[in-house]
Image (cartoon, rainbow, N blue to C red):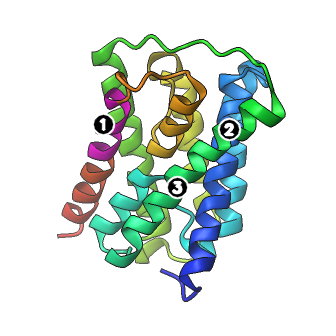
Amino acid sequence: MSDFSTRAKLTTEFIGTLFLSLTVCTAALLGTAGTLAPFAIASTLMVMIYAGGHISGAHYNPAVTLSIYLRGACEKSDLAPYIATQLAAGAAGALIAANVLVPGGNVEQLVLETGPAFAAELLFTFALAYVILNVATSETTEGNGFYGAAIALVVLAGALSVGSISGGSFNPAVTVSMIASGVLSVEDSWIHFIPQLVGGGLAALVFKAQRV
């Protein structure tokens, strides 16, 4: 982790997660970007990663924070504050999108088929965390300039591939924004939260196993 203060790290995590969630809500859930929504989301994530990576690590995702912690590249003292900040930013992004940017906008609630949606969230959260661990926390790729693009492209690929199956969250903070927007019911939220956390954990296990 960087030598920046805890306040600077959490502020960075809040800003990055806020704009990611805000883009998801406006571009995808409220439909301002139409079929281009995945590109808007990936672009926002990429620039926010480059903006904040040197400060907080630019996790912007509780499943990623968990994965990086299990990998050993995040202090235990940062774990809960990071996750709480990210979840709060996800909710704030949804509230700003629905009440300021697109007031009165209509959203359609997701109807999830449990098995496929669970698998989609598990696989692409794993892929996202696995890529992050390898391009942003590995000594062998330290100092590279492509990490932000690589991470964003995983999200773009996931959104295009399985967005219609699960909603393409891969991120508990984004899932919170989907709940706050009324797109995802609380009752169905486990279909997102559980595979996202499991996917992040599995990515850390695989990363560490590859280095034994």
The magenta region covers 190-199
Instruction: Work out whether residue 195 or residue 83 is closer to the camera in this orientation and state it.
Output: 83
Total numbered badges shown on the rendered structure: 3
Residue lying furthest bottom in this view? 3
Residue at x-position 82% and y-position 34% = 101
Residue at x-position 65% and y-position 35% = 24
> Dot 1 surroundings within 10 Å: few (below 14), some, or many (20 or more)?
many
Q: Secondary structure at mark 1?
A: helix
Which circle, 3 or 1, is nearer the viewer?
3
- Label whose residue precedes the other's in the sequence (3 or 1): 3
Question: Label 2 belongs to which residue?
Answer: 95
**Residue 151 coordinates in the image, percent (x, y):** 55, 51
| Looking at the image, residue 12 lies above or below residue 31 | below
Name which residue type carries label 1. Answer: Pro
Q: Is residue 194 magenta?
A: yes
Please tell me in which quadrant of the rendered image residue 39 appears: top right
Name which residue type carries label 2. Answer: Leu
- Label whose residue precedes the other's in the sequence (1 or 2): 2
Question: Label 1 belongs to which residue?
Answer: 195
Please tell me in which quadrant of the rendered image residue 185 appears: top left
